[in-house]
Each structure stands twice: as C-alpha cells, then as structure tokens.
Image (spheres, rainbow, N blue to C red):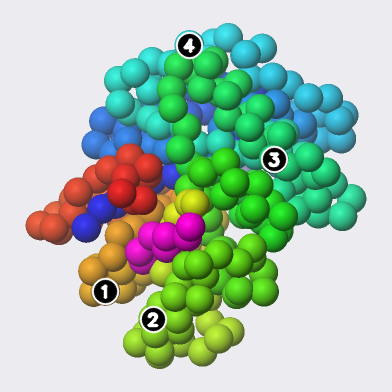
Amino acid sequence: MKVAIRDDDTSYFTAPDALDRVYADVWDRVPVCLAVVPFAIGYEQPGIPQAHWHSGESFALDRNRELVVFLRKLIASGRATVALHGYTHQDFADGYEFQAAPDLPDRVQRGRSYLEELLECRIKVFVPPHNALSKRGLAAVAGAGLDILGSFLSFRPSMRPWDRRTAANWWAIQRYRQATGRTRRDPLVYPHALKYARHSEFGCHSLVPGTTVDMVLRQFEEAQKFGGNFCLATHYWEIDPPLKGVMRAFLDFAARQPDVRFVPAEELFV
Ligand SMILES: [Zn+2]
C-alpha cells in the first residue's frame, strides 16, 4: 500500500520557515508533494498578508529567492516533489481559477514550464486551486497530460469531458459505493488511481481543522481493506500543534503497517 502527503499553497508568500516548522521531522520519512503556485495573486487566506488579499498584484515565485533556494534543495534531496497548483490561484467573481479563468490551457502550459525551469524539476501532477475544476478546467489539465491529485473530484460523466475510459470509471465508482454501503450523497474518496485516456486522477483525504486521528484512521483502514492507496492533503498555513499531532499519529500508525510504503505522491499514479 502506497501512502503519500500533499501540501498546498506554497507560493511567493511562503516563508521557508513556515514549511520547515511543519515538515522538518516529516520529509525525511515521507517525501511531501508541494502544490506550488507559480504567479500568486492574493485572496483571503491566513497564509497571505492581508495587504495582498485584494491587491490583484501577481507575484512570481522567483521574487522570493530564499524560498527558491530552499525548494531546490528539498527537491534535489528527495524530501519534496512539486505539483502545479493553478497559475495565480486568484478568485474570480464567478468562480475559482480553474473554473473561471479565460485561458486555462495557457495557464497550465506556462505555469508548468516556469516552475520546471525555476525549480529544476519535472512536474507531472496538477492540484486544482480550492479543489475546484470545471469541465473546461479538466480538459485543459488532461490536455497537458498532467495527472490530477484532487480532494472532491466529481465522477459524474456530465461534469467531465468524455473519453473512452469515462464509462468504465463511472461503473467502478458505483461498485465501490455499493461495496462500502454508501448512497449517492455520501462523500467518497476512491482509493485507486482512475485512468482516463490522457491522464489519471487520485483523490486525497483532507487534514483540516476539525480532522481527528480516528477519522483519518477509519479512512485509511477502508483504503487498506480495498487494496488501495492513501494520500493525506493539507495546508502548512493551518497546521497548529493539535493538527500536527494528528499527522504524526497517522504517520506512526501507517509506518507500523507491514504493507505500507511511503512514496512521493507522483507514484500514486504508477
Ligand atoms: Zn490552494
């Protein structure tokens, strides 16, 4: 069983210390997939200075040299991998970036090559800002061949561009729903990567304020029971000591399972 960690929202606004504070004792055990915003525009989020919540100014990641140097070292030493987390992560009047921005294929292509060059790495995974992806957003990401690490992915064929794998994936979800006694309204994270024609998708479990050790372990044990894999997704800027305790308890528990292997999130798609 593969187990991975994903952390969202690293951007120009991120101090290396803010990541170090959460992951200094984690990324030697488990590589952390950092979902990075290449040209951040502020929105109302505690990790971003209030002066930039509504400034509309775009901040290229390379303006934070200290962070760039820090990230390059993390990547080179295998402690972190990088996923593309939108282009600006800005909020539009009528939706989040990958629902509402006009030029989505461009944003994927430019954001990816900018980060690959700046951070000296390859990017294979996309994490939608606010976990929100319209049909058009999905087409842009799939068109670039990036795999998607989501949290509330929709499986409904009407919500997605249709390809030759869509129907079979939808049926796999229905079978899983039945096998786990869920109705259509119950939340569901499918524990296997779903392969579509040009990309794959994998759903993560959220570690957010209010998440308890019991909740995470129940989700983990369900994935384990069905022969699946597991990814815990969080934001460094909201990890306080109690939440860090939940993360640590989960990792300790997972490490004691004989069949568990900690992997970079990219390996969930292999
Ligand atoms: Zn985000």
Q: Looking at the image, which residue is at 77% across and 33% down? A: 42
Q: Position of residue 260 (x, y in %)?
A: 18, 54
Per the rendering, the mark at residue 226 is: 1
Dots 1 and 2: beta carbons under 8 Å?
yes
| Kind of residue sitting beneath label 1 | Phe
Q: Which residue is mark 2?
A: 176
Q: Residue 223 falls in which quadrant of the image?
A: bottom left
Q: Nearer the viewer, mark 2 or mark 3?
A: 3
Which segment is the magenta one?
A: 191-197
Report helix, strand or loop for mark 1.
Answer: loop
The local secondary structure at tag 4 comes to: helix
Q: Residue at x 41, y 77 (%)?
A: 172
Label 2 C-beta lies within 8 Å of the nearest ligand 1 atom: no
Nearer to us in this view, 266 or 63: 266
The residues tagged by marks 4 and 1 sit, at their Cα atoms, a distance apart of 41 Å
Which of the 4 quarters of the picture holds residue 38? top right
Residue wearing tag 3: 105
Query: Which mark sits nearer the N-terminus, 3 or 1?
Result: 3
Residue 23 position within the rendered picture, expressed as x and y whole percent measured from the top left: 39, 33
Asked if 140 appears above or below 26 in the picture, the reply is below
Q: Residues within 10 Å of mark 2 (few under 14, many from 20)?
A: some
Give the mark, 2 or 3, whose residue is nearer the N terminus: 3
> Is residue 194 magenta-colored?
yes
Prevailing SS of the magenta stretch:
loop
Tag 3: amino acid: Pro
Q: CA distance from mark 2 to mark 4?
A: 44 Å
Tell me the residue that label 4 is attached to: 69
